[in-house]
Image: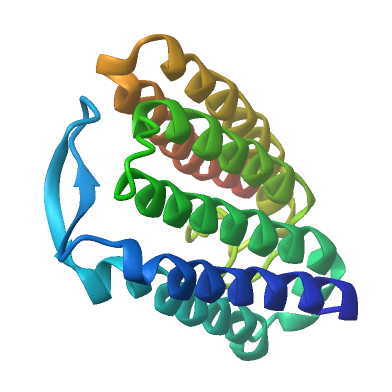
Amino acid sequence: MNKKSTIIILVILLLSFIVSFYFYPQMPLKMAAHWNTKGQVDGYMSKFWGTFFMPFILVGLTLLFVFIPMIDPLKENIEKFRGYYDGFIIIFLIFMLSLHLLVILWNVGIQISPNVFLPIGIGLLFFYMGILCENSKKNWLIGIRTPWTLSSDKVWDKTHKIGGKLFKIAGIIAFIGIFSRSHTMFFILIPAMLAAAYSIVYSYFEYRKETIE
């Protein structure tokens, strides 16, 4: 990870804790922390965990993301698209920080519907996942990892090109969920599941085609 990416990630982590410490005195003893598919609160957490759970999660996820390239047997391939991978880490952490802010603001009376935030945030994530897929090289821990993509560089590349396009489309469709708040999760989940399923099946048939040839 380069110096610029490291600084950005550290700033995101620091901001998450600053926000938590600043708003902690204003938080209720029982915080709204989970919403159902209609955007209604259906879960609560204690004041401490409602305020600090996400910063701790962000630290844990960052360590995981940093650790992954170090243990991959094909880590030299990850270095070939490391810029895109680091970009994904930053975008994902910004998304999680934004989700943290949504929870904090909700509990101080500024209620932004998750069904407005999630289609935008997850849509951007899916779209960037498409970019990451299109530029990824074969490895064991990042991307569309099937027995067939891991057995052939050609199948890996072809599967990730088509999978990347499909996840970009899934990201765009997710945005539409803003206009149908009672069905937001359908616009988010179904296209992504179809994109993943198609990519897996596609990799199998591409591998069969290659072995027959």
What colouring does the structure picture have? Answer: rainbow
- Where residue 151 appears, x then y in whole percent? 60, 64
Q: Give the residue at x 29% y 50%.
A: 107
Q: Nearer the viewer, residue 24 or 60?
A: 24
Residue 91, above or below 57: above
- Find residue 179 and report its image quarter: top left
Looking at the rendered image, the quarter that the C terminus falls into is top right
Residue farthest front in this picture? 25
- Where residue 50 appears, x then y in whole percent? 27, 66
Q: Give the residue at x 50% y 39%.
A: 122
Residue farthest top in this picture? 179
- Is residue 213 visible to the viewer in this orientation of the structure? no
Q: Is residue 150 left or right of residue 46?
A: right
Count numbered badges in the picture: 0
- Is residue 144 visible to the viewer in this orientation of the structure? yes
Residue 121, above or below 5: above
Looking at the rendered image, the quarter that the N terminus falls into is bottom right
Residue farthest bottom in this picture? 71
Q: Is residue 30 left or right of residue 176?
A: left
- Where residue 111 appears, x then y in whole percent? 35, 35
- Find residue 182 and report its image quarter: top left
Q: Give the residue at x 62% y 77%.
A: 14
Q: Is residue 39 left or right of residue 66?
A: left
Q: Give the residue at x 34% y 22%.
A: 184
